[in-house]
Image: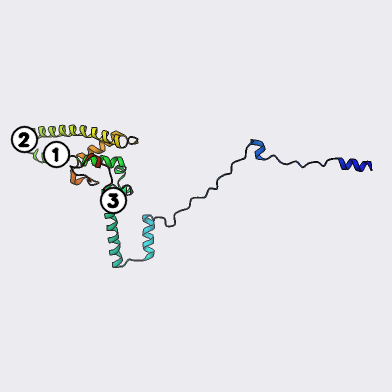
Amino acid sequence: MAKKSVQAETPAPQETQPASATDKKGKATPKRPNQSKARPPANPPLTAKEKREAQKKAGPLTKEQKKQAKEDLRNERARIAEGQWKGDPLFDKYHLPRDRGPERLLVRDIVDSRWSVGQYYMFGAFAILILSTGSVQLQSYLFIALVVLTAVIVFESVLLARRVKRIVSKRHPKTELRMGSLYWYAIQRSIMPRSMRNPRPRMSYKAKEDDLGKVVK
């Protein structure tokens, strides 16, 4: 009986539990967020090759379908051109890389809002080239005229660069573009004839400084 009482009083051994991550680190291990894999769009855009293959599978278009496709393409181009002219940021992606961004839109407006001698440089240089086949005295006069025209354009370019720096620094103080690239962009546009500038000018010569670089409604 004594043996049975001793066995009854002996406590049962406790089961050892494995140390949890909480016991090791002193804090609970954060749960990993449930990351879902990126899925492709439902209707991904077709490449040029895929578009040609799709057209081959669809078979030849009828005359009415071709006419409608051309009309849709013409309307889409007109819509894009209007959006670019207005300065709508949604249409900025259709510009060439050198013309993209609000800073370059502002620079274009700065150039287009002022009259300059530089926009006639191409016509003047072409006329001088044609007339230079005359007498030696005429050639000397034409050379002087070309030097004077070049000096005037250099002077205008300096004034234009200062204006670009002032306005761009005021509107976009945190721009990541180099001022030197904006200066060269403005000078290149200023010596182009106004009718040949691309993107086409939005501002008239009477445009105010507050209107430069804004979306036209």
Nearer to me, 106 or 199? 106
Position above or below: 212 against 56: above
Q: Position of residue 136 (x, y in %)?
A: 6, 34
Crowding around mark 1 (Cα neighbors within 10 Å: few <14, some 14 to 19, many 20+) is some
Q: Is mark 3 on a helix, strand or loop?
A: helix
Amino acid type of the residue that numbered disc 2 sits on in the rendered structure = Leu
Looking at marks 3 and 2 on the same chain, the residue that comes earlier in the sequence is marked by 3
Residue 184 left/right relative to 151: right
Looking at marks 2 and 1 on the same chain, the residue that comes earlier in the sequence is marked by 1
Amino acid type of the residue that numbered disc 3 sits on in the rendered structure = Gly
Q: Work out which quarter of the rendered image holds the N terminus and state it.
A: top right
Q: Is mark 1 on a helix, strand or loop?
A: helix
Nearer to me, 112 or 49? 112
Q: Position of residue 13 (x, y in %)?
A: 81, 41
Crowding around mark 3 (Cα neighbors within 10 Å: few <14, some 14 to 19, many 20+) is some
Mark 3 or 2: the one toward you: 3
Looking at marks 1 and 3 on the same chain, the residue that comes earlier in the sequence is marked by 3
Label 1, label 3: how far apart the Cα atoms are:
35 Å
Q: What element carries label 2?
A: helix
Nearer to me, 23 or 178? 23
Colour scheme in the image? rainbow
Q: Where is residue 128 in the image (x, y as percent from the top left)?
A: 11, 38
User: Tag on residue 83?
Assistant: 3
Q: Disc 1 marks which residue?
A: 125
Label 2, label 1: how far apart the Cα atoms are:
15 Å
Q: Disc 2 marks which residue?
A: 138
| Residue 212 sits in quarter | top left
Residue at the right extreme, as displayed: 1
Residue 70 left/right relative to 22: left
Crowding around mark 2 (Cα neighbors within 10 Å: few <14, some 14 to 19, many 20+) is some
